[in-house]
Image (cartoon, rainbow, N blue to C red):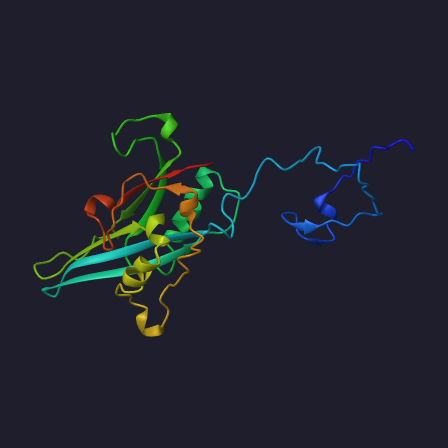
Amino acid sequence: MAETVRKIIVDSRYFASGDSGSGVYELPEIVEIHHNQVLYLEQFSVTNTWYSVDETCNQFYLVEWTYGLLNGGGFNRYQPRILTLPTAPYDLNSFAVALENALNGRDKMITGTYKVSRTINDPNTGATSIALAQNFTIILNQPEGGLPNTATTKVTESFFPVPEKLIGDPNWYQNYWLFWEDPTRNTGARPKYDPNNPRATTNLLDFPWAVGTWGTPAGPNNFGTVFLRPSST
């Protein structure tokens, strides 16, 4: 008996269960594959866009830092924050807007305002190049009127995003993230996460400075203006 070639076309719009990303397709009839026949994928078609941020990489981790003098005495306070970015097929500009909105969310401790923008300046050399337009800067602007600055009170605000190597370190999570003084501690609302599965946006972003084994901030040069570079866009 002559062999026949049959083509099975699967359209995700007609999945019996699941969604367009993952589902089950039911064949309208039984197809038998005999011992001397093979079944192989001939063609696979997808849309030309996809989610750059989804449930596996939608968490942005940072620590806000307020320090200085207050009524003549020194103080040093940290506020860990976890930002959840909406899932979407972002391009560079729309991602910057989403990140800026999340940074200025109602849970921020500091009074300054975050500004996220594209840059064409190399953070290391200062050189300008259109090829660098995939870089972001995050700048913390002081509130209108500035921060308190008198003979007995001087307040400074800053922040630092947490690099991936620290986010995924259970010891750092226990010893620093959960230890830092947190204004929400009296309500039991400390921001917690699973260091073994942080779902961090650092899967998409690359921090261009080298980070050692510090638990507290590495130095003021790492604060205030932070350059982030998407590794894939």
Q: Which of these two is toward me, 29 or 200?
A: 29
Q: Residue at x 40, y 61 (%)?
A: 193
- Residue 125 sits in quarter: top left
Question: With 220 as the anchor, is 27 left or right in this view?
Answer: right
Q: Which of 211 and 19 is in front in this view?
A: 211
Q: Which residue is drawn at 25% across and 55% down?
A: 215
Residue 16 percent across, percent down from the top left: 74, 53
Q: Quadrant of the N terminus?
A: top right
Residue shown at the point (21%, 49%) measured from the top left: 218
What is the quadrant of residue 194 in the picture?
Answer: bottom left
User: Percent position (x, y) of residue 176?
Assistant: 28, 60
Q: In this view, does 192 lie to the left or right of 215?
A: right
Compared with 29, 121 (above or below) is above
Relative to 120, residue 63 above or below:
below
Spot the residue most to the left: 151
Give the camera-side residue of 111 and 175: 175
Rendered position, 79 above or below 129 = below
Q: Which residue lies furthest to the front in this view?
A: 35
**Relative to 147, does residue 138 appear above or below in the rendering?**
above
Q: Residue 224: x, y in percent?
A: 25, 46
